[in-house]
Structure formats: structure tokens, C-alpha cells
Image (cartoon, rainbow, N blue to C red):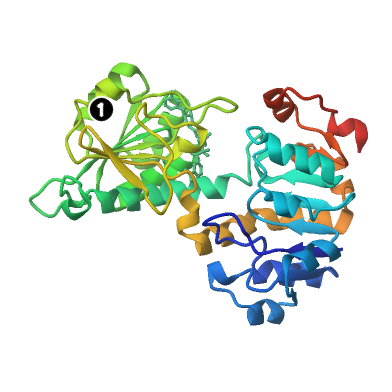
């Protein structure tokens, strides 16, 4: 199969669809890969390195789209990219179609087959192509919080780890899933005092066993969150209720009782945010203050570390890219979890959640493939 990798054009997106290691695997399996020149600039991989791994370089995106059987990207195709897709061509990338009727319309009109990273399931029902970005965001959240706790950044002037004779910072992590567990690992590693809050007692049991009392686990209630929000120097929000907006767990009233200069990091901002006072920010202007509390609410946190994020993404997407390249759409038929990634097939919508969000009709993917 001929695989095309254009340079990402969405604002502040520096990741790239495939890394050199992935190109080597694909070419070794008999496929060819055409990359747009400069596609790897944002992760510090040159055209020369891509060529050395077996890829070919095209002068522009139009050439990549025109010659590829399958486009592999990171972010959803922008309108100008949707217009370059053609009937029968496959595009495999993050789509996030539900809140995006414009992209849905353009993809349906293109006649292409669009498979979304974020709706692919594994056999346990997890979302394997989302997990690495939650890992990155979870770990980054602690790094970011430590930075904004500094007085020079508007924070309380507290060192996360403390020093001998002086207590460390107090960190509350709400939501002990992939992002929350990774945040916990970093916060503990940096020496902070950590409380993890989740509504799943099973998750709390696992953390308790893992950290042998080094981390305090607390069941999620309004009362417990209110209590620990007054104790915390840092609160990291990492909850997810699949298919729903994030619940507002820190209210404006709770915020007014928090310590001045403490830091909130709302990882769940891409689902609307789990603090009442959150609104999305960008890497250009990542923080704002409400009642003396710093809010960091960047919706694409992994974008800050594109090199790590791109390699983490490829570790999980490569097996799917390979099986698609080897078997075409038959790859979906033999894996129901992969089939759930199919969002658009030759002008038809094939995802129930997207159809419901946009009041459109859809067909079951199994009925047309
Ligand atoms: N901002 C970013 O750049 C970025 C990057 C990656 C992921 N995310 C977001 O981070 C969030 C977490 O993702 P994840 O992969 O860790 O999800 P996950 O499903 O692995 O974990 C979510 C956890 O939240 C818990 N939870 C749900 N409701 C709760 C409540 N009321 N109180 C306490 N805990 C509750 C669940 O029990 C679960 O343990 C998602 O919204 C995801 O979209 C954001």
C-alpha cells in the first residue's frame, strides 16, 4: 500500500503521523511511505532521516494526498485537507467528529473512509490509542504545577518536594485513571504529599496496594473534595465519564476557600473541565487566575512535548497502521474493536455517537463492510 504522511497544519500541532522507526517497519513489510517535506520538523526529525528509514519526500501536501492509498495523520483533517481526500482513500487519525459538524460534512462529501484513533477499542473495551496522550498529560500536569507554584510565576512560592526540615507541597489528584495514575507517579516521585480521589473504590484499592500507604486514597464526595481542596497547594483534575461532559467537582464556592497562589490543572478540560471556573486555554497563554488561584486548562497538553508524544502515539498506532496496510479494510472485519474506529465509510456515517450528537442517520459498520 502507498501511505502518505502530510505535515500537520493545525495551529500549534507539531506531532507527525509516523516516526522513522514506523517507516522502517512499513517499508520492510513491502509498503511505500511518502512524507511531505518538513513533516518531522516539530519533533526534530529531518527529511534526511526519514529518507534513511526508507521514506520518500514530496514537495507539498497535495502530492502526498494525490498519491496515497492511506493518509496517516495526528489531528483531524482541516477543511483544505478534507478537500484533497478522494473516494476510497483511507484516512487514519484523531477525528473527534461528534462536536464538529463541518468536518463530518466534508468527510462524508469526500467519499473517503475515515477511521478515528479515539474510537478504536481493545478487547477489554479500553481506548488504546487515547491512553498514551493521557499518560503524557498526567505526567506533564505535575511538571506544570511545580512550575506555577513558583512565586515568580504567581504561585504560593512552594517547592513541591519541600527540603529537609520543611514540609512538601500537598497535591490532590481527582480521577485515578490513566492520566491520574501517571500524575500520582510523578507527584510521589517528586516528594509531594499526595491524596488521590476517585469514585471507584476498586481504583482506590489498587492505588493503596501499589503505594503501601505512601498515597492517601479518598472516596469522591462533595464533602471530601471540599475538605481536601482547602488542604491542597495543587489540584489536578483527571476525571472522565465516558460519553459525557466532565462533572464540576471544584465549585466556585470551594475555590474561594482555597489557599492563595495554589494551582489547579484541569486535564479534563477537553471534556468541558471538572472545575466550575475552568475555561480552555492554549500553550500561548496557558494560565489565568480566579480568586487568587492559578488555573492551567490547556486542552492539548501533549502538544507541549511533541517529540515524546509522537513516539508514544506511534508505539500504539503502528500495529493498526501495519494491519491496515497489509489487509486493507479487511483488518477491521477481523477485529471488532478496530471496527469501532470506523466513523465514515464512502459517504456514510458509521458511528452512533457522532450521529446522535449531530442528529444524523448512520449505518452499522458491520452491515456495510
Ligand atoms: N488536556 C489534555 O491535553 C488531555 C490529554 C489527554 C487526556 N485528557 C483528558 O483527561 C481526562 C482523563 O482521561 P483518562 O484517560 O485518565 O480517563 P480514565 O477513564 O482512564 O480515568 C478517569 C477516572 O475518572 C474517575 N471519575 C469519574 N468520575 C469521577 C468523579 N465524580 N470523582 C472522582 N473520580 C471520577 C473514573 O473512576 C476513572 O478512574 C479525560 O477527560 C481525557 O479526555 C486531556
Q: Secondary structure at mark 1?
A: helix
Residue 139 appears left or right of 336: left
The residue positioned 73% from the left and 56% from the top of the image is 319
250 is higher (above) or lower (below) than 214: above
147 is higher (above) or lower (below) than 176: below
Residue 121 visible in the snapshot: no
Q: In this figure, which residue is indicated by the disc labeled 1?
A: 255
The residue positioned 82% from the left and 51% from the top of the image is 90
Q: Residue furthest left?
A: 165
Position in image of residue 245 (x %, y %): 52, 26
The residue positioned 72% from the left and 64% from the top of the image is 5
Position in image of residue 123 (x %, y %): 71, 38
Quarter occupied by residue 17: bottom right
Counting the numbered discs, the total is 1
Quarter occupied by residue 263: top left
Residue 297 appears left or right of 255: right
Amino acid at each position: 500500500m502507498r501511505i502518505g504522511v502530510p505535515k500537520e497544519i493545525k495551529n500549534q500541532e507539531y506531532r507527525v503521523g509516523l516516526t522513522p522507526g514506523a517507516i522502517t517497519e512499513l517499508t520492510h513489510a513491502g509498503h511505500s511511505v511518502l512524507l511531505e517535506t518538513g513533516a518531522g520538523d516539530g519533533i526534530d526529525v529531518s527529511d534526511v532521516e526519514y529518507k534513511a528509514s526508507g521514506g520518500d519526500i514530496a514537495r507539498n501536501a497535495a502530492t502526498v494526498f494525490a498519491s496515497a492509498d492511506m493518509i496517516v495523520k495526528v489531528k483531524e483533517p482541516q477543511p483544505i485537507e478534507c478537500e484533497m481526500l478522494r473516494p476510497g482513500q483511507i484516512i487514519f487519525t484523531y477525528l473527534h467528529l461528534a462536536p464538529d459538524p463541518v468536518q463530518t460534512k466534508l468527510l462524508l462529501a469526500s467519499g473517503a473512509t475515515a477511521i478515528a484513533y479515539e474510537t478504536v477499542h481493545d478487547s477489554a473495551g479500553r481506548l488504546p490509542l487515547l491512553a498514551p496522550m493521557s499518560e503524557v498529560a498526567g505526567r506533564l500536569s505535575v511538571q506544570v504545577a511545580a512550575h506555577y507554584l513558583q512565586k515568580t510565576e504567581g504561585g504560593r512560592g512552594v517547592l513541591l518536594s519541600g527540603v529537609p526540615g520543611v514540609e512538601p507541597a500537598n497535591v490532590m489528584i481527582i480521577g485515578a485513571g490513566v492520566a491520574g495514575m501517571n500524575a500520582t507517579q510523578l507527584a510521589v516521585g517528586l516528594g509531594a504529599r499526595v491524596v488521590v480521589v476517585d469514585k471507584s473504590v476498586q481504583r482506590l484499592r489498587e492505588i493503596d496496594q501499589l503505594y503501601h500507604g505512601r498515597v492517601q486514597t479518598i472516596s469522591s464526595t462533595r464533602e471530601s473534595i471540599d475538605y481536601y481542596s482547602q488542604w491542597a497547594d495543587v489540584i489536578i483534575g483527571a476525571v472522565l465519564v465516558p460519553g459525557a461532559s466532565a462533572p464540576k467537582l471544584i465549585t466556585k464556592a470551594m475555590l474561594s476557600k482555597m489557599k492563595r497562589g495554589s494551582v489547579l490543572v484541569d486535564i479534563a478540560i477537553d471534556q468541558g473541565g471538572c472545575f466550575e471556573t475552568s475555561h480552555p486555554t492554549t500553550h500561548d497563554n496557558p494560565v489565568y487566575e480566579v480568586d487568587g488561584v492559578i488555573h492551567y486548562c490547556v486542552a492539548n497538553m501533549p502538544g507541549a512535548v511533541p517529540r515524546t508524544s509522537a513516539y508514544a502515539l506511534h508505539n500504539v498506532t503502528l500495529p493498526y497502521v501495519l494491519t491496515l496496510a497489509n489487509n486493507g479494510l479487511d483488518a477491521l472485519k477481523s477485529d471488532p474493536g478496530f471496527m469501532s474506529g470506523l466513523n465514515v465509510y464512502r459517504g456514510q456515517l458509521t458511528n452512533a455517537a457522532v450521529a446522535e450528537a449531530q442528529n444524523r442517520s448512520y449505518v452499522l459498520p458491520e452491515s456495510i463492510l
